[in-house]
Amino acid sequence: MKKNKIPVWLAMLVTGAVYFGDWYVNREVVDRTDFQEVVEYQSNKAEIIQMNAYDQYGFVITEHNGTKNQSIFERTNDHWNLKATAELKDGMWGISNTEDGWLYFGMVYDSSVTKVFVGEEKAELFNAAGPTKYWLYLEPNKYNYPIKAVREIGKDIIIKDK
């Protein structure tokens, strides 16, 4: 009875192709111009709760093992890149140390909010569907500032005391 033997060189070639094939699929097949595809790739096993993309920034809320995180994506040269991720504190804000400084970000669920301040500086505000608004602010120096949301009418919302 004749045994079918696979030449060693063929086995190594197939093994290498499978290994590098997985690497290629996992690293290169993601269309970085497609926000949703990038988010799904980056989120790993976390459940995506909210996802909104704007011209320059994209905001994603995920939940994994009972912890909610917010991720900020930045579009550079038409490619989406993960800029920062942090656990949402009080369900409203996070802070992450980036190469550019401290990135404060979060959301408010009140449609009457017109401004958000980190310390004395105004954050960028982005409207989403419904009453949700995302905000972000890059602070190059310090990281312990109060955060407040200013309403059109009524009392300000203290998001974080100093």
Image: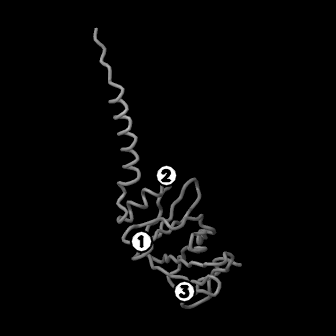
Residue type at the position of mark 1: Arg
Question: Residue 136 location, x and y as percent?
Answer: 54, 77
Question: Residue 47 location, x and y as percent?
Answer: 48, 56
Question: Residue 102 location, x and y as percent?
Answer: 61, 73
**Residue furthest bottom as drawn:** 153
**Residue furthest front as drawn:** 9
Mark nearest the camera among 2 and 1 is: 1
Q: Secondary structure at mark 1?
A: strand
Q: Which residue is mark 2?
A: 45
Q: Which residue is mark 1?
A: 75
Q: Secondary structure at mark 3?
A: strand
Disc tally is 3
Nearer to the camera, 147 or 97: 97
Q: Is residue 117 above or below residue 144?
A: below
Q: Residue at x 53, y 76 (%)?
A: 109
Q: Which quadrant is home to the N terminus? A: top left
Q: Is residue 25 above or below residue 139?
A: above
Q: Which quadrant is home to the C terminus? A: bottom right
Nearer to the camera, 107 or 109: 107
Q: Residues within 10 Å of mark 3 (few under 14, many from 20)?
A: some
Applied colour scheme:
one colour
Q: Residues within 10 Å of mark 1 (few under 14, many from 20)?
A: some
Disc sitting over residue 46 in the figure: none
Q: Residue at x 65, y 78 (%)?
A: 141
Q: CA distance from mark 2 to mark 1?
A: 23 Å
Residue type at the position of mark 2: Lys
- The quadrant holding residue 89 is bottom right
Q: CA distance from mark 3 to mark 2?
A: 34 Å
User: Which sits earlier in the primary sequence, circle 3 or circle 1?
Assistant: 1
Q: Residue at x 51, y 61 (%)?
A: 62
- The quadrant holding residue 116 is bottom right
